[in-house]
Amino acid sequence: MMLEALRKIAEEHRAAHPPTAKTLKVCVAAGCVSCQSDQVKKALEAAAKKGGADSPIIVKGVGCLGLCAQGPLVISEPGATLYRQVKPEDAAELAAATKHEPVKRLVAPANQVFYSRQQRIVTENFDRIDPEKIEDYIAADGYLALLTTLTTRSPAQTIDELIKSGLRGRGGGGYPTGLKWSTVAKASGSEKYIICNADEGDPGAFMDRSVLESDPHRILEGMALAGYAVGAQRGYIYVRAEYPIAVKRLKLAISQAEKMKLLGPSIGGSSFQFTIEVRLGAGAFVCGEETALIASIEGKRGTPRPRPPFPAESGLWGKPTLINNVETFANIATILRNGGDWYAGFGTEKSRGTKVFALAGRINNTGLIEVPMGITLREIIYDIGGGIPGGRRFKAVQTGGPSGGCIPEQFLDMPVEYESLAKVGSIMGSGGMIVMDETSCMVDVAKFFMEFCKSESCGKCVPCRVGTAQMYDLLCKISEGRATLDDLALLEDLCDTVKHTSLCGLGQTAPNPVLSTLRFFRHEYLAHIEEQRCPAGVCKMCIPQEIHR
Amino acid sequence: MSTPSRVITLTLDDREVGAHTDQTILEVARENGIVIPTLCHLEGLLPIGACRICLVEVVGSNKLLPACATKVTDGMRVITQSERLTRYRRRVVEFLFASGNHICAVCVSNHHCELQDMAVYTGMSHLTEPYRYPKLRVDASHERFVQDDNRCILCQRCVRVCAEIEGAHTWDVMGRGIEARVITDLNQPWGESDTCTSCSKCVQVCPTGALSIKGMAAAEMKKRKHFLAQYWTLKEEES
Amino acid sequence: MNRQTKAPPTEDKRWRLVDATMRRHGNRSAALIETLHTVQEVFGYLDEGALRYVAASLRVPLSKIYGVATFYHFFTLKPQGRHTCAVCLGTACYIKGAQALLDALKQRYGIASGQTTDDQKLSLVTARCVGACGIAPAASLDGDVLGKLTPDELVNRIEEATRHDA
């Protein structure tokens, strides 16, 4: 498809769906689907039909609307009224309300603050487009960046724009994306690959799932742009099999884009060609690690291998390979459409742009948010998140999943940046943010994550294979009140060894939850050890029986 | 990747040495008489960097790197011995002892065991962490060999020699994490394997008593690994 | 005995789906995981005959296919019950009481994660995170995600599902 044709589709589609049209948008991402939002949508469609042709109402499915715990969610336009916990029975009432006042009892109370503090770039289309319709994406300026870049920028200029944006990898490590791209671009060889890491494995994280389900074309466009910039013709999306809706929508999006010749040979009339295939993960957290992911795409056990050589030089089938995660690719098209300088205007000096977080745990507004980098944890938790329910006290917020740490109250006013989070022993991670209150025991939390690492360890290298099991046993001993201070010293020693000697990121970061809870909540460990007492009342103590002879 | 090998210099423990860019740190160290301990590594098999015994410090890298799998670069400064490395190496040996059932006195490989040698090398006289005492399988179904998982350290030498040299690929690793085990074919008894050629290469490269020849008494099992060097010499002559 | 052949292990027509997956990937060994997905999707689990057939078709060593099949938690070598309940053990669900769900199922059906009831009605597994953290604690029953569960609610949903079986 040529640029003019794309513009024409966009204009026609926009004309058919003016912003003044009465529209009911139903969230069709997994959170709401599991609360039967598909049936709500059907009921709304039926109600709209009954309304007759004189006052037409458009009913459409849209992506994740953020407040996942309040689903199913519906937005009524014009006016952007957000309804929550909508039932199919409410359909007629909602359809009728488009003509007059909103239905008060269903309006979400968090409506205002939750959204006003956010900054939407990655999620800009979530409440606008039907993820299963390519025309919707095109009408929202989709594929515009791809077709204009192909004709107006050289691959080197494309990478320069990205460097200018200051975008850093959103998978957790925060490696500068532009630098990664230029390494792959410079690598010798004509056969190169692009991989989108959609193996979102952190327990408590659903950012990538939401992006894939809500705006799949955005990923395809980002990958195609990457292919053009580094000189690759083939891309793979490695996505968890646990995300069936995302898989279905990705496959649909790929076939739609191929049909419109936005993927495939000679895209936009240029000599650039790019194809994308979906590969399913099969339940292995370690496959989020680049080299393990590559092994898995090659059909092998997903075990990592030592780096260097890095995938940028020798990746999939030994060829130079660019791997970025979902959120990173989701930023690309917008950056190239608006320019690197525009993007660099958001966030802080070292952490540019925005970050998507999945807010969960003991918090009022559970859901998906996108905020500018540099926002404080307090703003996220208390303003956007609405604070802790039940009048209970905040204890810690966990970021970075099993590789991250627990951040206590005294750091709530710290800005959210890669470096600041690392300084307090956690990591940015992929964006899971789990809030804990006084009912959580930090020893038990550490044990939970260690159990995770132990059973997700691939078993290839010794420190991770044995070390995580040994650390887990020690944590069990502590949580049951059977441990001594010597056990605690041993635990710290093992943490040090496993952190520094493991082969891949899984093992190297597995001790983090222990180290960070020890750093800020050592008194809880000591209470378990010295007083056989769990301050949060979570752990069941094993009372030592006196031995009688 | 396709760039031809160049001659470079690097520093190994304050010694300046020459090397080719296609060599690993371990190869260069051995050429220059510097001892870096290894366990999963075996010359002639592809390195996997799994045991972490051969980790070295490289100035400028915040990570320790496996000498067996890391290629040398120009101007690289490598530290192969330090108090820190010794501590980590000893801990890794402890991990191996803790995760299996290694009772030297009754083992066929007593005195001919690379794990035992490594315990001596790192000065690991006793364990500072608890033994796990796993319940593991002993498979004596093969007419000539015995597999004892209690003594296996998952170095994957058997897997590699069988796939890379013998070409049978009878062995592989099943499961993951602490539950991972080496298996033959579809995890069936070794004696019932369709693909095993009974060549004994796996037995000869096994660093411990995990794979042994039947009928050996304690301390009788000496491994003969020289066939690997012969194999590669022959290959080289052919080409 | 145990000869590797390239004919499907049974006459079952569903093998055509498996063949189609392998063909789509050019019968290359890289198709192994995609093929195992198809086998599990159509037959519910991976049995020995299936593993031998796929190994022979893609020319993958038997030990390698076994290694792959046991590496990924998604694959199972044992037949599953008519219904499968997957309790999510993600962090959000852990914080909101996923353990209570597991305990309730253990008490009601006497099975722990990875087990199937004697009457083959129900299999219980745990999921690492189904990405439904917004509605924790969550579980999925035969693929449908259920959110904000209490132990009683989950047991009721399972009872409802199993009651309809003959």
Image: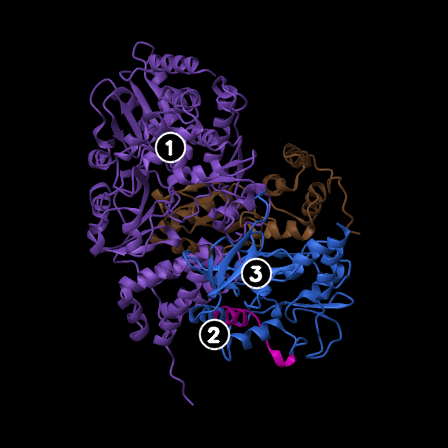
A437 on left or right of B39: left
Which chain contains the residue that carries disc 2? B
Label 2 and label 3: CA atoms lie apart by 37 Å
Which residue corresponds to the image point at 31% horizontal and 64% vertical from the top-left? Answer: A518
**Visible residue check, residue B181:** yes
**Image location of residue C140, percent across then percent down:** 45, 44
Q: Position of residue B82 (x, y in %)?
A: 44, 69
Residue C110 can be seen in this image = no
Q: Chief secondary structure of the magenta span?
A: helix
Dot 1 and dot 3 within a common chain: no
Q: Nearer the viewer, mark 2 or mark 1?
A: 1
Q: Which residue is mark 1?
A: A160
Q: Chain of mark 3?
A: B
The residue range painted magenta reads B91-106
Circle nearer the N terminus (2, 3) = 3
On the same chain: label 2 and label 3? yes
Q: Are marks 2 and 3 in contact (CB under 8 Å)?
A: no
As drawn, the chain in blue is B
Image chain in purple: A
Secondary element type, mark 1: helix
- Quadrant containing the C terminus of chain A in the rendered view: bottom left
Q: Is residue A431 left or right of residue B135?
A: left
In the rendered view, would you say B170 is above or below A2? below
Q: Is residue A382 above or below residue B31?
A: above
Q: Which residue is mark 2?
A: B130
Q: Secondary structure at mark 3?
A: helix
Question: Can you give x and y, in whole percent of width and height, for residue A71 in the image?
Answer: 33, 36
Chain C rendered in what hue?
Answer: brown
- Residue that mark 3 sits on: B28
Count neighbours of disc 3 (C-alpha within 10 A) and say few if under 14, some if 14 to 19, many if 20 or more.
many
Circle 2 SS class: loop
